[in-house]
Image (cartoon, helix red, strand yellow):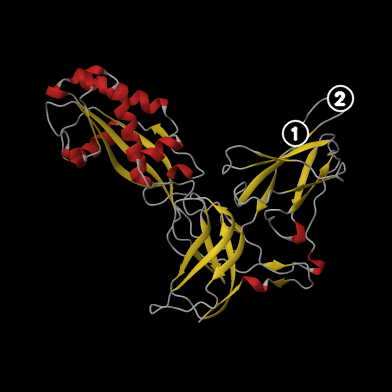
Amino acid sequence: MANALAISAVTATLRNLVTQAVHADSALSGAEITVAPVNKAPKNDNTNQVNLFLYQASPNAALRNMDPPQAREGDTAQPPLALDLHYLLTVYGGGSDETLAHRMLGRAMRVLHDHPVLGRQEIASALPGNDLGDQVERIRISLAPLNLDEMSKLWSSFQKEYRTSTAYTVSVVLIDSDRRSRAPLPVLTRGDGDVGPVVVPEPTPPFPTLERAEAPEQREGAVLGDIVVLYGHHLDGAASVQLESNRLAAPVELAPLAGGTDRVLRVRLPSDPGVLAAGLYSVSATILESDGDVPRTNDIALAVAPELVSFTPNPAPRDGTGAVTITATVRPQVLPSQPASLLVGSREVRAQPHPAATTTLTFVVRPAAPGEHWLRLRVDGVDSPLVDRTVQPPVFDPSQRITIT
């Protein structure tokens, strides 16, 4: 999801694309590319001009009111604002030269046809401060021809004489909600023995397969330096284990630890806080077989959890406005593009902006309720460990508690 600059970022990116395409023609090098309302164009009757006007922003029917992709079960997360943007591309030839107008129209339509999906780097360079390129859904451009009746109504509303135009739809833009969300504390046990259902496929397929990844101490996510156990079948001869994520420039390869079997692999996650970021990873294994083949298993999910190493002050006094500022030392590094928040009890507080990768985050709880509160750090949708399941019954980790006075 993106911040509130998303709409402006789309317009700026489209303007850059059209500018490059039109100015590539030497006869059109002086053409102006504008994003003005149609009733204010053209700026000059003697100037070649292409005008890209955002005339409507409508809700996207497919993603409207859906939960955010990173929302966890039980959270009261707010859905993003999902929008389709509708643009009208209009051309004006200098001196009312329609031949030049059609020349510009052809170049503008071709570049939008050749860019059905806006590139992440194109979006980032078009408008500083926007993060639209980081959203999961890609930004797609499609020609949206209007019939005679629709075009007539549109130009009538502009109260301008009709000019050669064509319409485009840009979809989908997801703007993150700024409303608060709540996250309840996790359930300590699920039935007798805290044993959930286990699905075992039968018959067992005859090729190497991973079924699940298990973090130590019954935690939901593994932390840096943990030994992760991978369960499956036909895993003997495993040569390496790969961890992949869109946060990594290249997959991280891990060597299996000694003592593996055809159904169990064990790997140790790197301890360096700069190698792996917190979040969800895709895990697979490469198997070296006796006949020389090197098959690769399927992918399974592994959550790498952040750690809330320490936080200050504790106790935390409220200021005159009832707010509390908490400085947290975390592990691993949190990247600038990663959403990070602190869960104070059941309340979610977003981190203050951090322009570079950091292990120190600042949170302003406003207003802060006095009393004792359990803390969890959430990065990329994965929570830091809070429940100690090495004892029975499970308990909350006392080191993850803050007192607000």
Callout 2: helix, strand or loop?
loop
Instruction: Mark yes or no: residue 255 visible.
Output: yes
79 sits left or right of 263 in the view:
left
* Residue 217: % across, % down: 76, 61
The numbered mark, 2 or 1, whose residue comes first in the sequence reads 2
Q: Residue at x 29, y 41 (%)?
A: 54
Task: Give the SS element for disc 1.
Answer: loop
Check the image and name the residue furthest to the front.
272
Q: Amino acid at mark 1?
A: Arg
In the image: residue 193, left or right of residue 36: right
Q: CA distance from mark 2 to mark 1?
A: 15 Å
- 380 horizontally vs 157: left or right: right
Name the residue tied to disc 2.
291
Location of residue 175 with respect to 151 vertically, above or below: below
Q: Position of residue 394 (x, y in %)?
A: 74, 71
Residue drawn at 62 percent across, 69 percent down = 185
Query: Within 10 Å of the Cα at label 1, are there few (<14), some (14-19), or many (20+) other Cα atoms?
Result: many
**Where is 76 relative to 290, above or below?**
below
Residue 181: percent from the left, percent from the top? 50, 64
User: With 336 as the anchor, is 252 left or right in this view?
Assistant: right
In percent of the image, x 36 and y 48: which residue is there?
Answer: 5
- Other residues around mark 2 within 10 Å, as few (<14) / some (14–19) / many (≥20): few
Residue at numbered disc 1: 296
Q: What's the amino acid at mark 2?
A: Asp
